[in-house]
Amino acid sequence: MRWAWAEIDLEAIAHNVGVVRRAVAPSAVWAVVKADGYGHGAADVARTALAAGAEGLCVALVEEGIALRKAGIVAPILLLSEQPPEQAEEIVAYGLQPTVSSAEGVVALSLAASANPQNGPIRLHLKIDTGMHRAGVQPSGAVALVEEIGNHAGLRLASVFTHLAMADEPNASANELQIRRFDAALDAIRAAGHSVPLVHIANSAAALALPAAHRDLVRLGIAMYGIEPGPGVVDLCSDLRPALSLHARVSAVRTVAAGEGVSYGLRHLFDRDTLVATVPIGYADGVPRRLFGTGGEVLIHGARRPIVGVVTMDQLMVDCGDLAVAVGDEVVLLGAQIGAAGQDAIPAEEWAARLGTIGYEIVCGISKRITRRPAHS
């Protein structure tokens, strides 16, 4: 096995689902497993979330939904945005629940449903753009689109929903404005005589911080993986457990003399003779090149040691100082490790803070070159 791998703690996934279920009850939880379960493995995460009480799943792409079906998962699977009309037949064939935001999307799905009547009515979710301006029908067009759905015998309205742009900043006035716009559109749909089976607004941040957004269900994404949705909700995340850790083993150890440099460009020069460990993992695996120069560290024997020299495609170097290190020693890049001084941990949020990004990008960026293994119990 390659000396670089990730460990996925499915017990942490189940725990986090339980934390959020209790926080949003009686609202249901649908687990978001797009982007291969945010880099954690979509099928395993989906099974774990469903066993922990999630009632449905959410993905971004038709291909992601098909992969779950081929893995034997029969739970409802929501496609979070309108898909290309060319994929309507696959949506119907695999029993996925599409989002619509245009009449053209509705017609394409109706034609696919007519060609596959044995699959029964297709459940459609209507997305309303209440202010994020990324996807969805405008509030003024929501009633007409619901009526368009009703004009097609093979289609049924399953839900009406929206997405908040600033849920990770719970005190932002934009949240109240978006919810108000959404409720006005929802009232108009009902006033026109249409039944709305389900209503949903909340992502992870709103599930934790905005009870007014809970409604019939919440879409649980990043918090399910034990990562903070944003700085404005950190105080609500103390019960969450990170589910992914990133590991490697030392592949080489050498003493580099004072005055010598290391890695491409020799950008790091040593002011004393230094023990340097090579670790066989790099930016092609999802370790950002920019970690050098921003204070990036790893754990070896439970001690923090700095990354020195630029991270290369397949390897990086670590200044081991006075630490006794040998080939084969375990290195933790993300996650916890116990050493002589106790336990320390490097969370995804730490990388994100150093790099000016978010935890989502860190875990989603761990590449397919890295084998995912079950975490040690």
Image (tube, grey):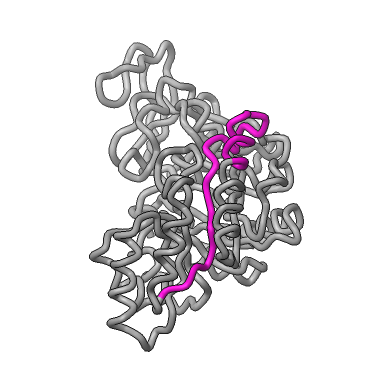
Image location (x, y in percent) of residue 52 = 66, 67
- In the image, 377 versus 122, the foreground residue is 122
Residue drawn where x is 75% and y is 59% of the image: 25
Res. 122 in view: yes
Q: Does 170 appear in magenta?
A: yes
Residue drawn where x is 57% and y is 39% of the image: 178
Q: Does 265 appear in magenta?
A: no
Residue drawn where x is 52% and y is 37% of the image: 165
- In the image, 301 versus 133, the foreground residue is 133
Residue 288 lies in quadrant: top left
Asked if 369 appears above or below 129 in the picture, the reply is: below
Asked if 226 appears above or below 91 in the picture, the reply is: above
Farthest residue toward the front?
192
- In the image, 273 versus 374, the foreground residue is 374
Tell me the quadrant of the picture where the N terminus can be found: bottom left
Asked if 103 appears above or below 156 in the picture, the reply is: above
Image location (x, y in percent) of residue 316 = 36, 34
Give the residues in magenta: 155-180
Tell me the quadrant of the picture where the C terminus can be found: bottom right
Image location (x, y in percent) of residue 20 = 69, 54
